[in-house]
Image (cartoon, helix red, strand yellow):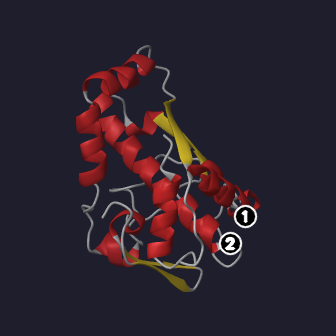
Amino acid sequence: VEMDMLKIFEWLQNNNFVSKDIEINSVIEAKRWFLENIKLDSITHFSPISGETNRVTKIVYSLLHTISHMMIISCGKHSGLSRDSISELIFPETCSFFIYPTSSEGIILGSVSGMFETKLNNFLEDTLKENEICTFDPVCSNHQNGACVACSYLSEVNCTHFNKDLSRSYLYGGTIKTDGEDIVIKKGFWK
């Protein structure tokens, strides 16, 4: 899944993570900006990304990671596969991610491709709308940064970042407490 870099950049500016003085008017300019400003060396698999070293990397990665988990959860509902049999790879410098089935079941690829062929609209609508409220809200939103086993966590062997740097606040707005600082998302990416 390749996200629109211009939309992500605009979202970063609207939430004051990037200066509004920076102008990007084309996809080529956006690609250059993301390649120059996403610092892959600050991402480790076993610990959260430090916001102090590169805040933009943390926010872009966390946005993509959260969207990936929401799509995996919806894919599990609509493909007939367990959400714990679908994995991810995240490519923040290109604003994209790859979700794929990892089960040893004989029909894994057919389940996912069949879902895309017959239930794409339902899958996308579910991904966008059915994840805003968690079963454990307000506890999840207020004390777990909007990410828990009920709404966004996957089995740790299926998550490329071991369920770190996730929050529904990136999608719907809210405050994320991390590294002793608050990341305030005034406008969620899906709002």
Residue 188 position (above or below residue 75): below
Give coordinates of residue 73: x percent, y percent. Answer: 36, 44
Give coordinates of residue 76: x percent, y percent. Answer: 34, 36
Q: Is residue 22 left or right of residue 4?
A: right
Task: Residue at 36% x, 68% y: name it.
Answer: 188
Element under disc 1: helix
User: How many marks on residues?
Assistant: 2
Residue 93 position (above or below residue 121): below
Q: Is residue 170 left or right of residue 80?
A: right
Q: Nearer the viewer, residue 19 or 69?
A: 19
Task: Residue at 71% x, 75% y: name it.
Answer: 53
Give coordinates of residue 121: x percent, y percent. Answer: 25, 35
Query: Residue beneath label 2, please?
Result: 54
Alpha-carbon neighbours of circle 2 within 10 Å: few (<14), some, or many (≥20)?
some
Residue 147 position (above or below residue 112): below
Q: Is residue 100 left or right of residue 57?
A: left
Q: Nearer the viewer, residue 107 or 31?
A: 31
Residues at marks 2 and 1, CA–CA distance in whole angstroms = 7 Å
2 and 1 marks in contact (CB < 8 Å): yes
Query: Residue beneath label 1, please?
Result: 42
Task: Residue at 59% x, 53% y: name it.
Answer: 161
Residue 55 seen in the figure: yes
Three-letter code for the amino acid on which mark 1 is drawn? Ser
Q: Nearer the viewer, residue 25 or 175?
A: 25
The mark closer to the camera, 2 or 1, is 2
Occupied quadrant, residue 83: top left
Q: Nearer the viewer, residue 49 or 34?
A: 34
Residue 164 seen in the figure: no
